[in-house]
C-alpha cells in the first residue's frame, strides 16, 4: 500500500487539471475548463457532518454512512476517513464573458456547466481510481448510487450529500447571500469531493461563522448578487431555489439556439460581484 499524504493527493488533482486534455470546454479547441484548483480536507469524525444531518434531514449521509453503504465494512470508524474537497475555479475568460451577460449565460459559462462538470466527474473518477490503485478504498459521493435529491423539511430541495458543505468543513469557504460558496478563489467555481480511508490532517477552518466571507452578513452591505439575478430569485432572505431552477431550465432553449449544444446555466450571481474571484476585502489568492 503506497503512503498517501496531502502532497500526493494535491499532485493527483493538480496534474489532472494542468496536464490532462480532458480538462476542456468541449468546443474542440482544447481551451481549459478550469484554472488551478484549491484543495482541503475534513475528517470523517468532524461533528459538522452530524450537524448537517440534523439540519438538512436524516437522509443526509455522514462520510462513515456512505462508506459503510458502499463497502459494507461496519468496523470503519469516522476518524479513519477523510473527505477530500476541491474547488475548480472558472477561468478568467469564462468569468469575463459571463460578467457581460444580463439574462442568459455566456457560451463559455454554459460550456463550463455541461462540459466542465463532465471534467469534474472525470476528476472524481480519476481520484478514486488513483487511491484504489494505491491500495485504499475511495468513493465519490456524487457518483455513488447512494446520492439522490430529497426534500428537506427545513430547506426544501436538498440531497443526500453536499459538495459545498463538505468544502465548508474543509476550510475552503463560507456561504454567501446567494447560497454559493465564497472561497479564496471566489464563488465562480465548481466543487467536488471524494471520501477515502486515508487519514489526512484536516485543513484548519479560518472562520467560525458560515457566512463570514459575505459582505451582506458581515457588514450589511453589498447585495450585488440581488441586483445581478435576472429573475429576482435572491433577496435579503436568501435564494428562492425554485425560481432559480425555473430560470436555469428556461436557458436551455437559448443555449441550443444560440450556441448550438444541449446545455443550460446562469451564474450571473457568481460573476460581476465582489465575491466572484476571491473573498471580498481580502487579497485574491
Ligand atoms: S455579491 Fe455581495 S451580498 Fe452577494 S454573496 Fe457576494 S458578498 Fe454576499
Ligand atoms: S443562478 Fe441565476 S437565476 Fe439562480 S440565483 Fe443566481 S442569478 Fe439568479
Image (cartoon, rainbow, N blue to C red):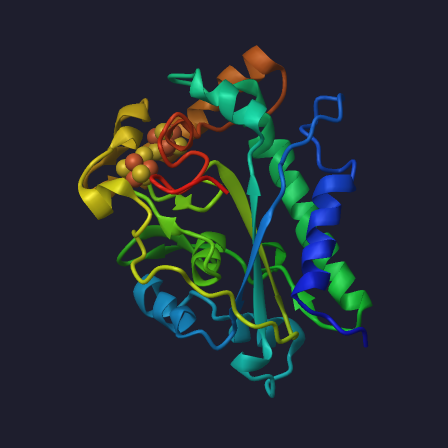
State the residue lying farthest toward the front.
283
Q: Is residue 252 above or below residue 83?
A: above
- Give the residue at x 61% y 39%: 117
In this rendering, the answer to whether 94 lies above or below 78 is: above
Residue 160 appears in view: no
- The picture quadrant where one finds residue 193 is bottom right
Q: Is residue 1 left or right of residue 170?
A: right
In the image as oriented, which residue stretches furthest toward the bottom? 75
Residue at 39 percent of width and 69 percent of height:
48
Q: Which picture quadrant has residue 76?
A: bottom right
Residue reaching furthest top? 258
The one of 201 and 151 positioned closer to us in this rendering = 201
**Tally of marks:** 0
Residue in the picture at 60% in, 88% down: 75
Residue 56: image x %, image y %? 34, 62
- Estimate the x, y position of residue 223 in percent, counting from the top left: 24, 33
- Front residue (pair 147, 12): 12
What is the x, y in percent for residue 264?
A: 51, 27
Q: Is residue 108 left or right of residue 162?
A: right
Task: Classify the position of the N terminus by image quarter.
Answer: bottom right
Res. 88 image quadrant:
top right
Residue 153 location, x and y as percent?
Answer: 28, 58
Residue at 50% x, 21% y: name it.
96
Give the quadrant of ligand 2: top left
Q: Is 29 situated above or below 53?
A: above
Amino acid at each position: 500500500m503506497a503512503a498517501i499524504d496531502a502532497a500526493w493527493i494535491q499532485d493527483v488533482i493538480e496534474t489532472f487539471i494542468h496536464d490532462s486534455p480532458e480538462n476542456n470546454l468541449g468546443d474542440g479547441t482544447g481551451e481549459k475548463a478550469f484554472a488551478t484548483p484549491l484543495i482541503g480536507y475534513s475528517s470523517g469524525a468532524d461533528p459538522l457532518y452530524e450537524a448537517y444531518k440534523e439540519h438538512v434531514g436524516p437522509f443526509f449521509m455522514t462520510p462513515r454512512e456512505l462508506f459503510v453503504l458502499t463497502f459494507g465494512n461496519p468496523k470503519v470508524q469516522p476518524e479513519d476517513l477523510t473527505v477530500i474537497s476541491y474547488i475548480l475555479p472558472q477561468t478568467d475568460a469564462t468569468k469575463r464573458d459571463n460578467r457581460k451577460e444580463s439574462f442568459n449565460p455566456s457560451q463559455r459559462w454554459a460550456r463550463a456547466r455541461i462540459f466542465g462538470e463532465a471534467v469534474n466527474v472525470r476528476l472524481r473518477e480519476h481520484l478514486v481510481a488513483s487511491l484504489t490503485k494505491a491500495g485504499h478504498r475511495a468513493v465519490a459521493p456524487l457518483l455513488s448510487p447512494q446520492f439522490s435529491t430529497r426534500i428537506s423539511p427545513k430547506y426544501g430541495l436538498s440531497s443526500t450529500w453536499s459538495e459545498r458543505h463538505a468544502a465548508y468543513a474543509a476550510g475552503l469557504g463560507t456561504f454567501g447571500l446567494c447560497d454559493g460558496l465564497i472561497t479564496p478563489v471566489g464563488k465562480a467555481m465548481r466543487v467536488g469531493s471524494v471520501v477515502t480511508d486515508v487519514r489526512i490532517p484536516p485543513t484548519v477552518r479560518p472562520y467560525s461563522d458560515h457566512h463570514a466571507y459575505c459582505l451582506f452578513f458581515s457588514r450589511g452591505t453589498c447585495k450585488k448578487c440581488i441586483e445581478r439575478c435576472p429573475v429576482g430569485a435572491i433577496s435579503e432572505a436568501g435564494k428562492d431555489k425554485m425560481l432559480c431552477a425555473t430560470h436555469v431550465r428556461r436557458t436551455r432553449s437559448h443555449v441550443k439556439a444560440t450556441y448550438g449544444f444541449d446545455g443550460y446555466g446562469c451564474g450571473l450571481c457568481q460573476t460581476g460581484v465582489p465575491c466572484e474571484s476571491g473573498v471580498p476585502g481580502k487579497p485574491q489568492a
